[in-house]
Amino acid sequence: MEVPERPLLAATFEELAMPLFDQLYNFARWLTQDTAEAEDLVQETYTKALRGFSSFQAGTNFRAWMYRILRNSFLSSRTGLKTMVAIDGGADENLLPAESTTPESILIARADRGMVQQALTALPVPFREILLLCEVEEMSYQEIAETLAIPIGTVMSRLFRARKALRDLLRKQSGGGRDGV
């Protein structure tokens, strides 16, 4: 009976894993800051996940499991958390503005996006990582806790501190430092 189960496991893996490809690639791109390295990291992630899929427990969070494999592969193959993470601004060039936007509003939005990217880059990696998983990848607190292997309380407190640090950096960048802003 093991022979028929193998293709079933591969098909099940494919059904679960392929919808995550773009999200995992984007996260890998942000971690590595390099297209080729991100591609290699995603390939390594899928290889490890397929090899270990038989040990995956049904009913657990597959998405968090895949992100954890990607993150652990990144940390073991690079300088890990010491690596600076930048946001890929290249994807913004492909976006078409809505009909109601003006050239001025596009410039303002790009300037604001640039300020946020600079502030994110200046954050310590644990803060940057948790913001990316929550705000960009739209993971739940539970998924983030599973991905980073930390308690959910730590996720909440780290996210609170990361958001505060990001706000403070944005205030400094904009020359704001004003109270109540």
Image (spheres, rainbow, N blue to C red):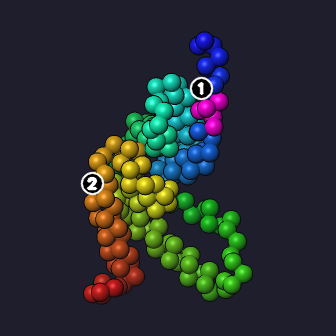
**Which one is nearer the viewer's eye here, 10 or 35?**
10
Q: Residue tagged by mark 1?
A: 9
Q: Is residue 12 magenta?
A: yes
Residue 57 position, x and y percent, is 45, 31
Secondary element at image label 2: helix
Q: Is residue 54 magenta?
A: no
Secondary element at image label 1: helix
**Which one is nearer the viewer's eye here, 42 or 7?**
7
Q: In the figure, 110 relative to 155: above or below? A: below
Task: Specify the amino acid type for callout 1.
Answer: Leu
Q: What residue is at 46 percent from the left and 54 percent from the top?
A: 139
Residue 1 position, x and y percent, is 60, 12
Residue 46: quarter of image: top right
**Which one is nearer the viewer's eye here, 26 or 81?**
26
Q: What residue is at 30 percent from the left and 84 percent from the top?
A: 177
Task: Specify the amino acid type for callout 2.
Answer: Gly
157 displayed left or right of 101: left
Q: What residue is at 40 percent from the left and 45 percent from the top?
A: 147
Q: What residue is at 51 percent from the left and 47 percent from the top?
A: 28
31 displayed left or right of 39: left
Mark 2 vs mark 1, CA separation in Å = 34 Å
Q: In the figure, 66 relative to 129: above or below? A: above
Q: Main secondary structure of the magenta part?
A: helix
Q: In the figure, 121 relative to 73: above or below? A: below
Q: Residue tagged by mark 2?
A: 153
Residue 20: quarter of image: top right
The segment highlighted magenta reads 11-15
Q: Is residue 48 visible?
A: no
Of label 2 and label 1, which has the lower sequence position? 1
Residue 124 position, x and y percent, is 33, 58
